[in-house]
Image (tube, helix red, strand yellow):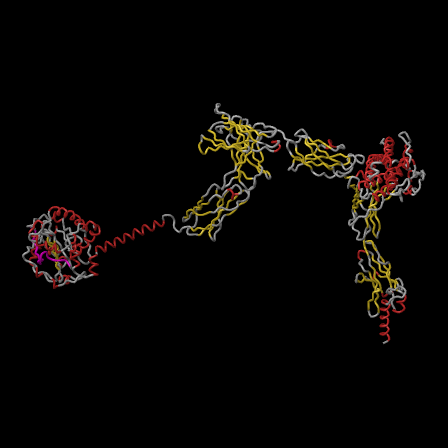
Amino acid sequence: MFSRWNWVACGFYLVLSICSPDASSGFVQSCGHIIPESPVLALGSNFTALCILNESCLDFGNIYASQIIWKIKNRLVPKEQYREINRTVSSVTFNDTSSLATPLTCNILADGQIEQNIYGITVTVGLAPEKPKNLSCIVHQKSKFTYSMTCTWYPGRHTFLDTQFRLRYRWPEQIFPDCIPKDVNNSCTIDDSQFFVNTEIWVEATNALGKAVSDPLVVDPIDIVKPLPPQNISITSGLLPTVLQLVWENWISDAVMTLKFNIRYRIAGDTNWMEVPPEDTASPRTSFSIQGLRPYTEYVFSIRCMKEDGVGYWSDWSEEKTGITIEDQPSKGPPIWRIIDTSQSPACWTVHLMWKALKPYEANGVILQYELTVRDKSSLSSPVKKYNVTSTNHTLQLREGTYEVTLMARNSVGPSPPSVLLIPASNSKAPVKNLRTLPKHDKLWVGWTAPNNYVLKYVIEWCLMSSSSDCIIEWQIVLGDVQGIDLKGIKPFKCYLITVYPLYADGQGSGQSVKAYLKQDRPSKGPTVQTKKVGKAEAVLTWNHLTVEEQNGFIRNYTILYKTIDGNETVVTVDPSKTEYTLSSLTSDTLYTVRMMASTDNGSRTGPDFTFTTQKFGKGEIEAIVVPVCLAFLLIVLLGVLFCFNKRDLIKKHIWPIVPDPSKSNIAQWSPQVPAKHNISSKDQMYPEGSFTDVSVVEIEADDKKSFSEQDLKPFDLLKKEKSTSEGHSSGIGGSSCMSSPRQSVSDSDEGETTQNTSSTVQYSTVVLNGYRDQTPVQVFSRSESTQPLLDSEERSEDHAGGADSTPQRQQYFRQNGGQDETSTDRPCFERTKQITHANEGDLVGFVQLQISGQSSQPLGLGMEKNIEEAAVSNVLQTCTEGQTVRPETVEENPLSVDEMPKSYLPQTVRQGGYMPQ
Amino acid sequence: TGVVPFVALLLLQRRPVAGRALLVSGSGCPGHGLCRSNVQEQTRRQVAVLNATAQELFSLYLKCQGEPFSSESDKLCNPAGIFFPAFRVNRTSERKEVMVAMYKLFAFLNASLGNITRDQEELNPMAKELLERLHNTTKTTRGLISNLTCLLCKNYNIFQVDVRYGDSSKGKSAFKKKQQGCQVLRKYVQVIGQAARVLLPHLSPS
């Protein structure tokens, strides 16, 4: 209990001891202090501090040195560095002050581990100043009588301490006030400097750790003067056009310092200075005449000075002053060249004379005018023409010939030497050889090899090539001993056309041209490729050349890159002169992507992609397929048409079957008065019974025609009248045509019917060729479709018998259902066509009667029908046109007379013409 | 400002006083490291500068003082009535004697120019060029004294010379100040020319 109260009392006393005001000092009375107080230490040195406790604290607070702890900036110092000297003093030692920091505090650890600060000091660590080095001084002239001396030095390493530098100087028996630098530590300016006295100058650097003094500099300030440059410079032009005189004032009197000078000058606008030889201005002066200047040229002058013996410093260059020399005659004639335009007429020239204005150093003044003289050398009698021109070009209309043009430039002093240009009738002289170019930085060098003959001058023309405008020619003339020049003002990435003409004393050589670039780049765009033609395995690509503005250099090659969607890219290099290329070995019916790249020496540029698809079929393949197919189709169609045409009756029958009407049978009306001069062969003999199922037979005896008198044919006139159809329309009758008559007959009966059926529907057809009564006999086709049986079978038998001999020779036309192969008989049909023509030409008088015996003609009819069909196909046109022709061959093959012809029996009587076809 | 006293002698300025030349050893000369061989030439150049600028200084002084000094300079600036150190040496005099006489002359001039400068700063503060010339001349005489001290000490072991200074202008009227200045400068123009001539053969580089 006592112990606790004791510690509380001690702590309270300690606080009071530290905080209570001391009556004697008036400040806080601490329990101790540290020595040394706020030391400044050299970096890297060792340092020992002592903390000394007051006796009063020992008595009342039970505080002893053993309880002291040291801290650096709140960091505890290791106790190994402590040392308890006695009960009130503790020391701490640091072997290297670089480990020190501020503040360094002395603290005490009272009972209860309560840490109380006793005292603290600030520690400053730094370096002693180094000896200033490299001291140098310069005296600047400020005005005519004032000079300031500025000295500079190297202050040495950083000391981390407040270090003062002082510039000190003295005379032998006098020390002047120090010069203390402001804001810097390496220079100081003394405003008052005195010449002709040896002055000792040095620098002192001082800080808390020491003082360092530089080596002294002993100098007479007159030897380190940098004077002010000459002033009030004036320039006057003398009597000579090449001289200017400079006059100036010096700031320093010769009594103080004699000066030497540098004079520099340049042409106004030029950047290069020229300098008067130093030895010419090495003595004191205030004027100088500069010679060798160009007439009528503005010059800029500047002067500087320094002590005559060269000890000291040059002044700055003076303010620049300008002066102009007076004019002189132009030193040379203007370079002249021409462009001859013969577009109007080869014999009439438009000569554009052009010359360059003289350079200022050539003009030597203001050119007032150009005096142009043109002399026709091809005609001595022609007067010399003179022109005074103020511009630099002139256009003349001249006839083709040789001319000498003389040009002089005149200024206020006089004319220039003449420039002569010979314009020959033709440029027939030798040209330059080996014309070449070479870029040199920003210039383009043009070189050539001289011709073998002596060349007076060369004219170099060049122009910037453009696709949108004309080439504006620039030109330059050089002497004949020059074989290369640098063209200036050449733009990079632009194409120039350069032409060199040699000028001889007696003529002019033809120009040699070359294209050149100062600098090349890759093209600004790539070619746009497209297809001209696309095939199955090839494609023709076309493109346009890049314009000269787009090329940016010489196009070395084109590269075509093409690929399929999923294939590898194929590269083809194409000559740059080409604008078309054929890709081969392509895959058919495939999409290709193609692009094109133009390349110069400095890179490439690719154009847009273009796609195309190769064709599925090659050239002619489609035609090879389509044409045969079409032909085959046409053939099939034709065959079909022919077939249908041949089978039209059958088709018709199928579509519109004919039903015989018994009530309209004419059998009862057959007139027995009408002589039945039928020449009907015996069907029985020709066609055995049962061989036909449904046959219409037409038997025509050509000779029968003769057997019919006109009287006999008259009864048929009515029929002709009633029937609007003429001979051509009779084709509906089965016997009228080798082709149609059987078919017509067939149409009267049902196809496919049996023989029995057919017999019940016997059809009759009669062809009446004789006239009816007194009327002109005409061919009449009569037809009966009665289903009644024939009445006179006997007569028919006779007819058949009577005609037995001639049966084999008769041609019989019929039609029958069903098919049976048999040898063709179409040829005879054709022959008959011819013969019937003859018959018609003779006299087709008489008639032909067709008699059909369905039963007896059937077997043979099967084969005959076939024959007819084939004949119809092969001779369809011919057959049709001959329409009603009937068996003309019978005229030849059956020479029987009408009387001898077997009489055929007309089974019916046709009223005025007989049967009317339905 | 204006006068930087040559301490050893200037303290005796209040009354015209004769200085005493002391003999000292060469090594004991103040700033003996600076007493180099070029001091002789430097001294000649300094006298030449003073000689070259003295007339301009005097003319400018008269101009700046206004009337009657501009028109009556001969009368007003007659130095007959003032003290000016005697300069009784010629080209044949001994160099040592010349050096001592020179020292006395320029010690006097330095003090007088200092007084004149001080008076002109008071009377013609706007006469910048005059003040500038007075400053410059004073500085030159100060340098000249330094060099003469070096030469006397180094060559003749003389480190102290009896010097008599002129009357102080302090407390005098402006006119008197101007007139005293005018009289001193006029005499200065005359004597400096003589000094230059005398000094030339003695200080020419051999």
Q: Is residue B22 left or right of residue A620?
A: right
Q: Picture coordinates of residue A572 (x, y %)?
A: 48, 45
- Does A878 sit above or below residue A224? below
Q: Position of residue A112 (x, y in %)?
A: 82, 70
Tell whether position A914 is magenta.
yes
Out of A837 and A337, give the one closest to the viewer: A337
| Viewer-nearest residue: B44 or A608 | B44
Quadrant of image for the N terminus of chain A: bottom right
Towards the viewer: A327 or A698: A327
> Is residue A203 part of the magenta span, yes or no?
no
Secondary structure character of the magenta stretch overall: loop
Q: Which residues are magenta?
A: A900-918
Q: Position of residue A177 (x, y in %)?
A: 84, 46
Q: Residue furthest bottom?
A: A1
> In the image, A673: left or right of A629?
left
Instruction: In the displayed orientation, state which residue is furthest to the left.
Output: A673
Dividing the picture into quarters, in which one does residue B118 lie? top right
